[in-house]
Image: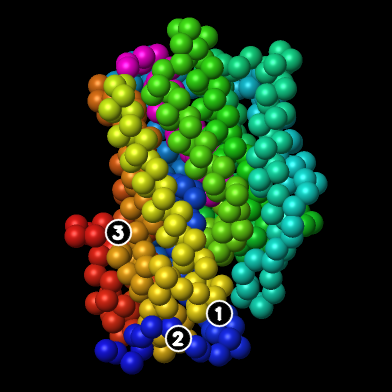
Amino acid sequence: MDARVRPRAGAHRAALRAQRSHRDARDADDRQDHRRVRPARRARAAAGKDLSVSRRTLGPLALTLGLPPLTYSFWLWLRDHGGALVAPSLRELIANVPPPTGRAVAVYGAWLLLQVALQQWAPGRVQRGGELADGSRLSYRLNGWTSFCVSLAVVLVAVVSGVIPPGIVYDEFGPLLTTAHLVAFGLALVLYVQGRGAGRTTRDPIYDYFMGTTLNPRVGAFDLKYFCESRPGLILWVLFDLSLAAAQYQRHGTLTTAMLLVCAFQFLYIADYFWHEEAILTTWDIKHEKFGWMLAWGDLVWVPFTYTIQAYYLVDHLHALSPAATAGIVALNMAGYAVFRASNIQKHRFRRDPTRPVWGRPPEYIRTARGSLLLISGWWGIARHLNYLGDLAMALAWCLPTGFEHPLPYFYFVYMIILLVHRERRDHELCQAKYGVDWEAYCRRVRWRIVPGVY
């Protein structure tokens, strides 16, 4: 057996604490990585210096101009064609983009103000983030769970008291989408201008606008990236689901099993995210990604308005699920959730205490020449990213209740496959460059990337 691959027995605690400061980006990225879906490829630390012209300019330009029309296409396919993929002309698409209504602006504006207030003043413990390039660490108030619960309660009171109708999302989806676009584009512009004024831009304004110029833009102690990553879009995702379920009941006088499953599954996922909120501090977005259009638009538009495709589709598709189909879908989601959560917790506990048993036995690891420890037992001895397999199982379970009449509700599952395979490949390249022969030894021990026996 390679001398660097052995069961962990009784190494000195002080040495282990010293090793923790050298934890690599791979370990950090494997912590619970909520479905922060990004419409663009991840930038590396020195992205601005070695990217080709197409990646620096044409790619960001194409995504900035192409993704917003795609979100409107999703909505029009659902609203006007029952989910059928009908290709509209560009003129037709532009003609169908709704302006923001007064009600949409008021609702979305009030929502953002509520989330800002909760982020700033809701009770929660303060935790320091990862070490920055200058050696400093920023502080974050972890009050996501409180904010999540308070947000649900406030909206419930507003609905019961008649301030807003329960099915408002279905009625105002287009104007809300336009309003969110305006906020995201405006925020990205403010960030770009601020970065330009501080001398942090490159010679490529399109790339700077898209990727951002500042890692942790703050207004006082208020962290804009952390806020957008975790608050307005994620909680709105749950509320959109619930409002669309209300629309189904208002329009048809029933709540289908399929709608209940989609809402319950996604509610569980977001609740789990906020319960383990500290995990976001070690994700790639927080540690390495600058805050520009890519993250702002992804957080404010992409997440709440595309991850709810299944619920929107089910508003007017009332097909029944058999008890067997229901049981199978529930089992798939819970199995995926169990793998996702258990594997992430196992890695998190190993980081905090490498002597802690894994499945009742001393953990095995590879000690790299840089001092990092790569876990190769438990879930992490089965595949390098088994948590991604759990993610994909849940994604499929969220789509299956919609049936098989149209492919559009399965967009999320297909997108997640592309996203997670790309993320795994990126991670492999980074670790290969960083650890060399140690990474090769790790890959020999843990052969499978995501799906054991397949990939």
Distance in Å between CA atoms under marks 3 and 2: 28 Å
Distance in Å between CA atoms under marks 1 and 2: 17 Å
The residue wearing badge 3 is 450
Between residues 407 and 56, which one lies in front from this camera angle?
Answer: 407
Identity of the residue drawn at 40% across and 43% down: 334
Q: Is residue 248 above or below residue 237?
A: above
Give the number of the disc on residue 455: none
In the image, residue 298 lies in the stretch drawn in magenta: yes
Residue 231, image quadrant: top right
Q: Is residue 382 above or below residue 245?
A: below
Q: How many marks?
A: 3
Residue 396, image quadrant: top left
Identity of the residue drawn at 73% across and 46% down: 119
Q: Give percent across and percent down for residue 371.
A: 47, 86
The residue wearing badge 2 is 9
10 Å crowding of disc 1: few (<14), some (14-19), many (20+) = some
Q: Is residue 259 left or right of residue 149?
A: left
10 Å crowding of disc 3: few (<14), some (14-19), many (20+) = many
Identity of the residue drawn at 46% across and 54% down: 341
Q: What colouring method underlies this structural image? A: rainbow
Question: In the image, which residues are magenta?
Answer: 295-320
Q: Give percent across and percent down for residue 38.
A: 45, 49
The residue wearing badge 1 is 20
Identity of the residue drawn at 49% across and 57% down: 32
Distance in Å between CA atoms under marks 1 and 3: 25 Å
Q: Give percent across and percent down for residue 128.
A: 69, 66
